[in-house]
Amino acid sequence: MGRAFEFRKERKMKRWSAMSKAFTKMGKEITLAAKAGGPDPNTNNRLRAAIQNAKSVNMPKDNIDAAIKRAAGKDEKEMEEIVYEGMGPHGIPFMIETATDNPNRTVADLRVIFSRNGGALGTSNSVAFMFNRKGVFKFSAEGQNLEDLELELIDFGAEEIVAEDGEVTIYTDYTDFGAMQKALEDKKINLLSADLQRIPTTYKEDLTDEQVEEVIELIEKLEENDDVQAVFHNMR
């Protein structure tokens, strides 16, 4: 009885920790989006997408509103968006998007994380050529005719439409993000998420189970860092 209680307590704490980290990252993205394009989601595509993504993980409205207000706050520390590159164990390239008020701290932390997990932080453009930046939109497949949808959305930049596990994923060039977002909204499609991702041009699939675990360990350590917003790699 005691061990079962402790197990449930530990699982609950892990869920709360994961939720807290998600809210923190979503809050940063909302603040950065509002600072870059203004506080009105009707005229700021990035902010509108950030709010939608925050709602998808059940971030409270008060938190969302507070994040928008922080963008105009005089006491708010200036945040920089910096993308770092590195090579993980077994030749796995990494792109790490960060939002930081102290780049010196961030680069030092990332360098330590890589070195302790069989990798090395790289220089600018050391692995960027292995990734393409894409707009990625996800929504429920229920009630959708994919053939009709593809014909309707190709003019708005749809490059690929994939249906899997009850969800539809649309990929666009990053320059078509705003046009596709508006097109889906005009069609009254309720988005589960909409964001810009760095998609690898090729994937590494021949790792052993042990090697996969080593790469996952690096991914988890990077994602635990408070300055890291997103981690991209080519392991599959």
Image: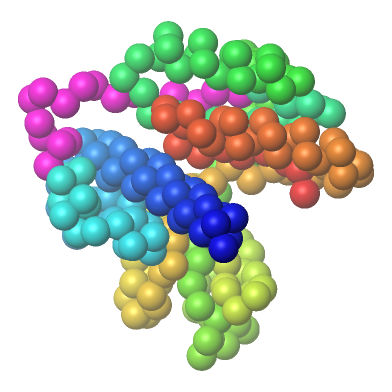
Can residue 127 be seen here? The reply is yes
Location of residue 115 in the rendering, given as x and y in whole percent from the top left corner: 68, 14
Where residue 100 appears, as percent x and y from the top left, is 36, 23
The answer to whether residue 18 is left or right of residue 235 is left
The residue lying at 77 percent from left, 49 percent from top is 236
- Would you say 74 lies left or right of 3 here? left
220 or 47, nearer to the observer:
220
Query: In which image quadrant can residue 161 be found?
Result: bottom right
Query: Horizontally, is 202 left or right of 135 in the view?
Result: right
Q: How is the image coloured?
A: rainbow
- Which residue in the rendered view is the most extreme toward the bottom? 143
User: Which percent across, then down, holds residue 74?
Assistant: 8, 25
Q: Is residue 172 visible?
A: no
Of residues 104 and 136, the one drawn nearer to the viewer in this rendering:
104
Say whether residue 83 is magenta.
yes
The residue depicted at 57 percent of the width and 67 percent of the height is 169
- Seen as rendered, the residue at the extreme left is 74
Query: Quick check: 11 above or below 160?
Result: above
Q: Position of residue 183 (x, y in %)?
A: 38, 70
Q: Residue at x 48, y 29 (%)?
A: 225
In the displayed structure, would residue 40 be above or below residue 130? below
Q: Quadrant of the N terminus?
A: bottom right
In the rendered view, does 142 fall on the left or right side of 72?
right
Count the marks.
0
Q: From which residue to which does the magenta span run?
A: 69-85
Q: Quadrant of residue 59?
A: bottom left
Q: Is residue 227 above or below residue 182?
A: above
Magenta stretch encompasses residue 89:
no
